[in-house]
Amino acid sequence: MKILREALVAVVVASGLVVHAGAAGNSCDSLQKMMPQGATVTLAELVPAGGFRAPGAAPAAQNGSRFADLPAFCRVAATVKPSADSDIKIEVWMPAAGWNGKFEAVGNGGWAGTISYPAMAQALARGYATTSTDTGHSTPGATFALGHPEKLVDYAYRSEHEMTVKAKAVVNAFYGSAPTKSYFNGCSTGGRQALIEATRYPDDFDGIVAGAAANPKTRLDTCGSGWGSRP
């Protein structure tokens, strides 16, 4: 009887998650067909509590403590192509229950090239719908920009704005309502991204955290490479 009761509880909890996800808006898997123009959804799934595995991470780190304690959430991955040479990857995570009604985009570090899963996990654990981007490439360093000016534009500023517009549309579709407040939180490269968002796209966010902003970018990178340094 105990096993039967536990099985019934599991079914009820799982059913409750699905109902909550679709009660005001749409179910998680239905978002596969609802991405705005210029983007293609590659994944839309309901991740159970503690069930996230970080792509590309070593097995020991795939489900570390920061991920093991996460609540159930709807995970949407998409590719955005604002130019013919763009290949911007984004992810949007939305709590299956207990959403605080707010949205938090998180920034990158260095030359980016990866989704900021740890930062997304922190935002999700606090009840935020959250998003991150690889800024349009997956290679270490700046070699991605050689001969690819559109990819440099994506890294410089376009990817964050495209991510934000698409992610807000996904949140709206999932919950059936837009976020009451939207924030950007980033440090280093993320701080630079925050400053650019504030100056180029001031309507994207209601509040911005720009920590240790890597700015001005040109001087930082040339000096760090031994170019252009003063005597």
Image: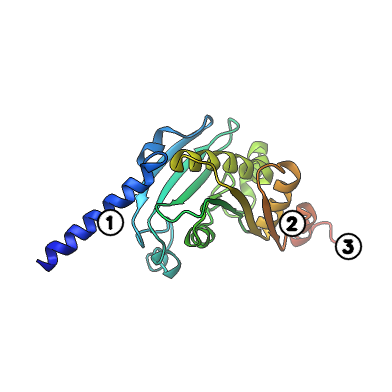
Please report the residue visible at 41 percent of the width from the left and 41 percent of the height from the top. Answer: 24
Near mark 1 (Cα within 10 A), the count class, few <14, some 14-19 or many ≥20, is: few
Q: Secondary structure at mark 2?
A: helix
Q: Secondary structure at mark 1?
A: helix
Q: CA distance from mark 1 to mark 2?
A: 51 Å
The residue carrying mark 2 is 221
Give the quadrant of the N terminus: bottom left
Q: Nearer the viewer, residue 6 or 162?
A: 6
The residue carrying mark 1 is 13
Q: Nearer the viewer, residue 129 or 210?
A: 129
Instruction: Identify the mark at residue 230; answer none if there is no mark.
Output: 3
Give the x, y percent position of residue 101.
Answer: 52, 51
Q: Is residue 110 in view?
A: no
- For badge 2, the amino acid type reads Asp
Which label's residue is closer to the chain start, 1 or 2?
Answer: 1
Near mark 2 (Cα within 10 A), the count class, few <14, some 14-19 or many ≥20, is: some
Which label's residue is closer to the chain start, 2 or 3?
Answer: 2
Q: CA distance from mark 3 to mark 1?
A: 63 Å
Please report the residue visible at 66 percent of the width from the left and 47 percent of the height from the top. Answer: 205
Which label's residue is closer to the chain start, 3 or 1?
Answer: 1
Q: Nearer the viewer, residue 117 or 134?
A: 117
